[in-house]
Structures are given as structure tokens and as C-alpha cells.
Image: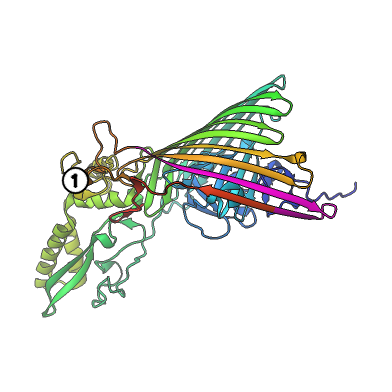
Amino acid sequence: MATQTVLGTEVVVSASRVKENILKSPVAVEKLDIRAIKETAAPSFYDALENVKGVQMTTSSLTFKVPNTRGFNIPNNFRFMQLVDGVDMQAATLGVPLGNAIGPTELDIQSVEITPGAASALYGMNAINGMANMITKSPFQHQGLSIYNRTALNHIDGRDYPVSNISEFALRYAKAFNNKVAFKVNASYMTGTDWQSNTITNQNPNSLNTANPAYPELDGNNNPAYDAWNRYGDENNNAVTISGVNYNGGSKTFILRRTGYWEKDLVNPKVDNLKFDAGVHYRINDNAEISYDFRYGKMDGVFQRGNKIQLDNVTVKNHKLELKGSNYFVRAYVSVENTGDSYNLKPLTDNLQLTHLSNSAWGTRFKTKLQTDLNNGIDLAAAMKNARAAADAGRAEPGTDAFKRLKDTIIRINNWDHRNAGITGAPATGGAWLLQKSRMYHTDAQYDFENRIKFFQLLVGADVRIYEVIPDGNNFVDFSRPLGERNIPDKEGSFGKNVYYKKIGGFAQASKTLFEEKLKIVSSLRVDYNPEFFSKTQSTGCNGVYCK
């Protein structure tokens, strides 16, 4: 047997939007093909991207992983484009690519191509950081039935949660008839118990001016300004200052923070991810094929934006119609997003507390008990603990039926601002529901002049995208409505008129090989036109203290 090495025979399509040898690509492209995916030791092909050169993976949740290249990493990396057969996987109003939570199953993945640098010249402004292009298997070339079932254990230390099972089942079936018509069906379902954030470190130690630095005896958890990493409701907006406390022969001032609620009491660690897609392909002739594909994904999980968000029953649907030939394609798709029963942890905890007492009333209770204990000779640290218990008396405590009922009520109310509670048409308490719905309509086309131009190769393309934003009264507000009604639904449940944002773009790419294909010159030009960034319905960015 003789050893033979074959280098650079792989073909990629992402770098220049046409098939080319990976060594002739004008930019670096990292590729995972079927063989590499089968041989990877990662739990899934998507996890395997973390081992690709130049790729960093942020794992926000068991179902929510965010790849990133070229710096600028954030938990919801909207600068890194993720495509599945040309369809953008970004959820429009969430502003985050949901990646493989709604993408293909491992049984249907043909290859993954990673462009670690900017790809915006050919793919638009969302590809500033890079791009992942996931290409699925053709039902003509890959037929038959495939099934897998995976199981694993996590939380094996039993520290934050008992040992739990992770299970994933997937199947793929494809069939072709007379090499003319073919279809494929994919489905998968994953369940598991997510990792839980439970860091109790104080991010507001009493050496800071915001945390009673004049009282060193209030160290550690005794500090009434204690602000834990993974506790909500003890942030700056819930700081209370009490003055006029008689202590050590003088009038003293203390900075307090509401007690808040631990994240583990607010988030459901049980998650699941359901994916389904089906496609029908018809070969018009040897060089032309038309296809229709439907994709549906439902997911739970947690991700960090301005605040932490519990994703619950988030769904995204894609419908795609495509005509492609040997040197062209025309594609149109619509993506429909619904955040389902998701909710924002920050307004949830604030409204849990405000339903009990306002910040000022809570501070008054605290001060009264504190002064009583100090007058009775109780030391400051113990008096602070007793005062907090007195101020919290009667609030909904985790693990009780009252807490569950109140939490379930708040996460089904879409008015985050408790200040509007009780006004005409508004609920009795503020809410935390992340109710976001949108539709994205996209059409793009590409034509490769191939041998029609002898002196050089020319590739041209264009795309049109329309975002249909549905106001929700929190993130997206219809400013044409009266101020007090913007986050209150009308009789039809609407928060205002839908608004359409349009984007038009086009590109041209010319390339020329010289010196017997030893030198390749590539030049790309892209123009994008956004008629409007703002209109009567705008993203508010931050609604008071609730940054979104």
C-alpha cells in the first residue's frame, strides 16, 4: 500500500457565491464536510464549529449557541450571519440568529462553511463579523431513511440540580422518482435540563460609594446594598436611601437594595427543541430545478440581552421557493417569528416586588424596624437582617403557591411598566411578557455570466428585504398612539399599526486569473439602500430601566 496525499480538492461556495476550489478562494473559508462531521467528537455538528479555526462559541443555553469570528463578541451576535440553504436564520425582532435551534438536523447537513472575516460585500451588512453557511443534502443524491437517538447525563455533581437526562431523537427520509421529482422530510426533538446561573458574588461591595463604605461592620452579605450577580430586583433602580437613623450618637444614612429573587427561582431549567422541515424538488431539465421548502423550529432556553430572557415556546417558520440553474438562482422566502410565552427577568422581579410594596414603602418599613432594634441595643448587622425580614414580610416567596400564581400572572402581562398599572384599560400590576412577532420577506437573485464574457468572470446579484414589525408596546412602540395607551392593547389585541422597513441591495463581482491560474484578482462592489431607519414605530431601546 502506498500513501497518497490529496490537498485542496474541496469545493466551497461561500467565499465568492460560486463553486470554486478551496485553495482558490479569495478569502479564508473553513469547511466541515460530511466526513469531518461524522468524525468529530463534539455532541453535534453545530458544537463542532467551536473547534474550527477562528471560531468562538458562546453557549447561553443548552439550546442556544452563538458562534462568532473576528471579535466584537456579544451574547446575541447579530453581526454574524447564519444561512441555511440561503435562508437567513435571524429572528427579526429578537435581533439574534437562532442558529441551529431552528436549523437543519445533523442527518440532513451536507457541509458547513465558515467565513471568519467580513462577508458583507456579497452578503450584506449583517455579515460584518463573518458567516456560517449551512448546506443541506439534496433528496436526489441522498435517499432513504436515517434515524439516530442520543442520550447523555448532565448535572452529575448534583450541586445545583439533580442528575438529569438529555435526549435527542432525529430522523430523515428522502425519496426520488425517476430522477425528476424528489422530496425529503426531517424531524428532531431534544429535551434536557439547562445549566442554572447561581453566582452569589456581590457586585456592589461596601468599598463602593453606593454600598455604605462608612460602615465596615456591614461586610459581605450583611451589607444592605448587597447586589448578587444572579439575583434580580436588587439593582440600582431598586436602591432605597434611608436617612435620619439614630446610630452611635448621630443621625446616619444608609443605602439599601430590595431583596430580589434568585434567577434559579425565576427560570425553568427544563428545555426542549423541536425541529421539522420538508421539501419538494422538481427538475425541469438537466440544468434547472425548482423547489419548495418549509422549516419550523420551536425552542426554549435562556439568553442574555440587556437583561436575561427566558425563552419559552419561541417559534420560527420559514417558507422558501427557489429556482436554480447551473449559473443562476432566484429565491424568495418568508420568515415568521413568535416569541410565544417568553418573559424578561428584570421586569418580572421588579413587578413581583412592587406588587408587595413600593420602594419607598418598603424603605419606611425597613427604617422603622432598624431603628427599633438599634434602640434596643442590637448590633447593626443583626438589626439590618431583622429590618429586611420585617420589610419583606408578606411578599410572595419562592416555592409557595402565592409566588407561582403571581409569577404566572405577571409573565402573561405585556405592560412592563408598573407605573401604568391600574390606569384605565391597564392591568393591576406590571408585566414581563416578551411578546414579539414579526415577518421578514426576502427575495434575492444571482447570475453568473460564466463564459459569456471572455476577458473576465462577472457575477451579479440583488436582493430585496422587507421587515414587517408588529408593535408590542415595549420593544416596538407605535408613537402615533397617545402616551398612556402605547403599551395597552385595543379591543382587537393590537398595540398599533404594523410598520414595514425595506432594504434593497445589489452587488457585482469581477475576477480574473493570470499566469496560468497562479494569480487571481477579485474585486467586489456592493450597494445597499435603506429608505428609513426610523418611523412612527421604533425600537425604544430602553423602556425606563428595562433595556431591551
Q: Observer-nearest residue: 377 or 208?
A: 208
Residue 9, position as x, y percentages in the image? 78, 46
Magenta stretch holds residue 521? yes
Q: Observer-nearest residue: 48 or 539?
A: 539
Q: Residues within 10 Å of mark 1 (few under 14, many from 20)?
A: some
- Tell me: residue 339, above or below residue 256: above
Residue 507, position as x, y percentages in the image? 61, 46
- Give the farthest residue toward the bottom: 249
Q: What stretch is highlighted in magenta?
A: 498-522
Main secondary structure type of the part rendered in magenta: strand
Residue underneath mark 1 = 421
Residue type, numbered disc 1: Ala
Residue 183, position as x, y percentages in the image? 62, 24
Q: Observer-nearest residue: 209 or 93?
A: 93
Which residue is pictured at 33% across the width and 57% down the height? 231
Which residue is pictured at 18% across the width and 42% down the height? 428
Asked whether the viewer can see residue 253, the reply is yes
Magenta stretch holds residue 206? no
Asked whether the viewer can see residue 43, the reply is no
